[in-house]
Amino acid sequence: MAFISIRSLTKSYTKGKTSVTPLENLSLDVPQGEFLALMGPSGSGKTTLLNLIAGIDTPSSGQLEINGRNIADLSQRQLTQWRATHVGYIFQLYHLVPVLSAYENIELPLLLGKLTKAERRMKIQAALDLVDLSDRAHHRPAELSGGQEQRVAIARAIVHHPELLVADEPTGDLDRDSADSILTLLQQLATEHGKTIVMVTHDPKAAQAAHRTLHLEKGQLINNPRQ
């Protein structure tokens, strides 16, 4: 069974008097531990698909199963709880809190749970070790390079051990060397730690780091040999 199973997924909304359908009748399987890149022109539906997979948005129709659970059937409250447990987010501009240290930024998702301070410390240290930033734990974002900021953001995304990571242009604001370093880390998270990663990118070189690249145009997948 695929970790992500999508069948006949459609997303429509009304903008003014116009009906917009960024995704229409889309089907896709993503196995556990795959690093998948989504590419396509602006307006192709790739960010819409990413948001649906992450549970940020809900489909108009169709089936969207993550690890055997149809998240399209969840209430908003259930969806919020599901995201907090099962999904990690990685964004282009990091979204770190500037007045907090790297350690404190990584800690934020854990504050929603019932862990003790010692339990949180263990998880944060493990995440810092994984992204190779233990020596920057008490630095604030302004004291870090762009690549280091993105590593903090990745550590924050994985600190609660989600099975699914969604990445929206995670290297788009980085120089080539920093971008390559982040892509190598994402590869390790998929290959060595079993994370399923879905990444939206405009960068063909970033897409080459993924196990598979799919292209979207006008809400449809093209060049998809596994379907």
Image (cartoon, rainbow, N blue to C red):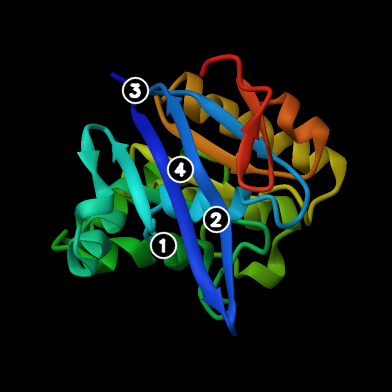
Label located before the other in sequence (1 or 2) = 2
Query: How far separated are the C-alphas under marks 3 and 2?
Result: 21 Å
Where is residue 53 shown, x and y percent of the image? 42, 47
Label located before the other in sequence (4 or 3) = 3
Residue matched to label 1: 57
Where is residue 94 shown, x and y percent of the image? 61, 62
Residue 165: mark: 4
Disc 3 element? loop
Q: Which residue type does callout 3 highlight?
A: Ala
Q: Which residue type does callout 1 highlight?
A: Asp
Residue matched to label 3: 2
25, 174: nearer the viewer:
25
Mark 4 closeness class: few <14, some 14–19, many ≥20 residues within 10 Å: many
**Mark 1 and mark 2 residues within 8 Å of each other at the beta carbon:** yes
Where is residue 202 shown, x and y percent of the image? 78, 45
Residue matched to label 2: 48
Query: How far separated are the C-alphas under marks 1 and 4?
Result: 16 Å
From the viewer's perspective, is the residue at label 4 or at label 3 nearer? 3
Mark 1 closeness class: few <14, some 14–19, many ≥20 residues within 10 Å: some
Label located before the other in sequence (1 or 3) = 3
Residue sitting at 47 percent across and 66 percent down? 105
Q: Quadrant of residue 131?
A: top right
